[in-house]
Amino acid sequence: MIMRAYAAFIYAFLYFPIAIIVIYSFNVGRYAMDWQGFSLQWYGTAWNNPFVMDALKNSLITAGSTAILSIIVGTAAALGMERVKSAVLRQSFDALVYIAIIVPGIVIGISTLIAAVTVFDLINPFLASLFGGNAPPKLRLGLWTVIASHVLFNLAVVVLVVRARLASLDKNLLEAAQDLYATPFGVFRQVLLPLLLPSIVAGGLMAFTFSLEDYIVTSFVAGPYSTLPIYVFASIRRGVTPEINAIGTVILVASFTLLIMAQWLMRREE
Amino acid sequence: MSIKHKDGKPISASKLMDELHRYRKGSVTRRHFLGVTGLGLAASVLGTAVPGLRPRKARAAISGTLSLCTWPNYHNQANLDQFTKDTGVPIQVTTFGSNEEMLAKLQAGGTGWDVFVPTNYTISTYVKLGLIDPLDLSKLPNFDAKTNDPRFTGEGTVDGKVYAVPKDWGTTGYAVNTKTVKNEMTSWKQFWDLAQTDYSGKVTVHDYQLTTIGNALKYYGYSFNSVDAKELADAEKLLLAVKPHLFAITSDYQPAMRNGDAVMAVCWTGDAAQMARDLPEIKYVIAKEGGEIWTDFFAIPKEAPNKEAGYAFIDFLETPAVNAKEVEVHGYPSTDSRVTPLLPDAIKNNPILYPATDLLTNLEFGAAITLTDPARAELFARFKSA
Amino acid sequence: MREISVRWPARQAPDLEIGRKQSLAPTVKRSGLVTALLVGPAVTMFFFLLILPLVVVLIYSFGERADAGGYAPAFTFENYLNLGARGKAFFNTLTLAPLATFVTILFAYPMAYFLAVKCSPKWRTMLLVLVIVPFWTSQLLRYYAWMLILGSKGVPAYLAMLAIEGVRIINTPFSVLIGAVYGFLPLMVLPIYVSLERLDKGLIEAAEDLGATPVRSFLQVTLPLSLPGIATGSMLTFILLMGEFILPAFLGGGKVFFIGNALVDLFLQSRNWPFGAAVAMALVIIMFVTVFAYMRFVLRKSGVRNVAMV
């Protein structure tokens, strides 16, 4: 059937570049598109490269913190907004969520950089005079600024995902639960949380993945720190060895797994 | 490696053992033994050639990591590895293809760089912006101001204080693949004209306003550093006309030249030397209208987190023996006269590194104004966005 | 890059249980505090990390370029008046983005149709997931792969073997187009799939009973009803393409300049922060206008009352 053939073509189109990355990570030779034999050496090179490991460590710390913070803040906000009756407040909050998602990453990155630098320049002299000495505490760009800016757009995603799920819940169920449990917290713990858990976890997995693979925002606000995407980008610009393919394959496998889990969780409830 | 006797004849193994025996018995002095076997001479030559054997002042122990911001293809990886082996400090390398990008990052702050490589004309601006501090020359015992050509190194000193020490010097011309480009290339006029006609789609220029605008200005015979509005307008017209014919705008042009995507590229000395080493058909042209002559320096940003490692690294690379090994690999000539005798003849006679004096006379050093002039920056941005 | 499938809560039915409400009155104050605690962190983050930086950018956009680059406080409209200097970047983005979106629709629709209509339900979910997942894996690597495929050792080399010489694909608007279609195909497939799946198949049967040919029933029944899905996918793709920087940088070789590239250049090379701020503001405004237009016209037209995106 034409449709089946077309679908197969699309899958080939989608996965061919990914296959190239993966296959050439096992290439003995240095240059991609120039197959010379099978080898795992580049995985070893990457593993032994202290800068790759440092970038990986930073990426995992950032992504993990982002996911956890996004889940907590986002779910809380989604639940909290349910309780807000005022239409004006609801729409204002919606507007904020929308803005966080619509504003392009590059603008978020640049604006966070400018704002951070401006604020630091204002506060640091004050800190210096307060603490004095040779090395007063200084605010500077670091993993914390990366985590903060990642949480920003990921919490909006979590809010949307959890809110969509909340909206589809059977209202009778909630009312029955309210009759059973005296406190709203009881309702939350015994009824809402289990129902929302798949969406919350899915949102968290998405947040983790987006944070792990983000380049644009991170490149502006990371300061001296390196994350995997930053390392990969710099290598691609500079001249690549299959070490990058090896790193890439590992990233692909990891995010593939995480995202399939997220999708499975989200679709389970439909 | 055979041991040569004083008159050049190698000593035989049995004679060596004889003399050793006599020395151990005490029949001859050490001096005699060393002289006869030629070991003394060998030892002293070896001693100066191998960095590890050279006598030098003890270095303060350093730790942590070193973050180096430099240009593409600019170092001998073996030297970097040696530094890490000697000190235990791994080196993280970031590269940029223009001084503007380095300045932008330093201005934004939080780069984490311990050493970076600015070009001569930028140093006064860095000083003015308070981004670098004067260097503590006592921490750079292997740098000798007297053996460095002041013509090249003067700009590293501002108001009598040394802010940067020289790394190497070079020129900016263009590389040509003579297998494809059969014309006799000698001028910028040819470069820019042929880029639009015969070799359309196969030419690259630097992603760097100084050289790209500068060499466009040379097409008209204007100064490389001009900030005159009319001259810049002419240069812009040329650049915009050429842009559709370019293969890419990049300071990382080696891959394109090596695999044939590009046949002409605005190019620095060392890149040309590196490419010509592997592909003899690649020639380097210093155009007769002129171009850029420059010196690159090492400097330490004011907010560098590991300044001690920075000093140790710069001192290591300023050591003549190490510097010579750098030159052999990256192909940029050194400003230090102690380095030249240590280079192999092939390099000393390479016209890419050491061009004829008459070619050098038309070259200009970059001017500080080009770094800060908004018109040039904006022109280049318009060119890129066109 | 981000999937949005949302149903906003339906408008609340009027609360008839007044008695119950009154009995909760003493706890209203406490519940207000709880609400504030729940929503507070998010709002604070939005304020400090989104609104505040955007305000700073807005202020900067009225400033002047400092001597050596950066920001100098001032109040001038010059940067906005000068936006035309980046006209080509805006033009590139505003032409390639819609074109790429359109081409993506052409490729994505049949795929979505296959999954929603022709594919057996057993495989449907898994196949759909397989389409979506590449979208969320590392963008850098997928575009890098295309650099290899379209570079001189890739497709052109194979074409040369077929005696088609001198084809150059990389570093052209065409390669950026290919990269864009490739990158956003999954994002387009999902909403179209969802809206096709919700389609009442009975409608198509009814049309065919009334004598419509398959083509006509597609054009007059299926296509119009899947319009919301197309619109959502288009809006998302278009918005994300407008902000793209890596795609034109990798596949355009410095020759294809998008607004994103102009921004990176203005902040990280030419260092004209106020002008960069103005360009950033212009980009944000364009985005909002796009979304607003989408909300108003497309949703209104397809008869959807709430902001249901599919």
Image (tube, coloured by chain):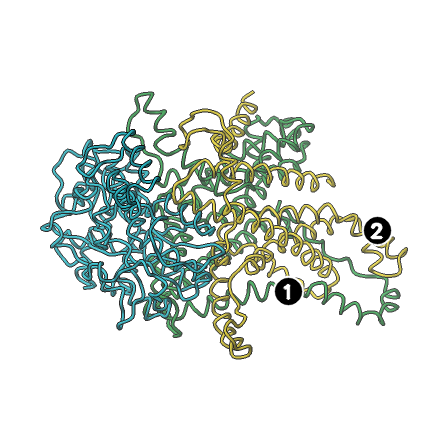
Chain colours: A yellow, B cyan, C green
Task: Describe residue A34's horizontal placement relative to residue A171 as left or right.
Answer: left
The reply to whether residue C303 is in sight is: no
* Residue name at image x 39 percent, y 50 percent: C258
* Residue name at image x 77 percent, y 49 percent: A169
Q: Nearer the viewer, residue B96 or B333?
A: B333
Task: Describe residue B65's horizontal placement relative to residue B285 as left or right.
Answer: right
Q: Are marks 2 and 1 on the same chain?
A: no
Query: From mark 2 to mark 1, how far is it between C-alphas?
Result: 30 Å
Question: What type is the residue that disc 2 sits on?
Answer: Asn
- Counting other residues with Cα less than 10 Å from the Cα at mark 2, is it few (<14), some (14-19), or many (20 or more)? few
Q: Nearer the viewer, residue C15 or C236?
A: C236
Residue under label 2: A172
User: Which of the 4 image quarters holds residue A152?
Assistant: bottom right
Tell us which disc is closer to us: 2 or 1: 1
Q: Position of residue B202 (x, y in %)?
A: 25, 38
Residue under label 1: C43
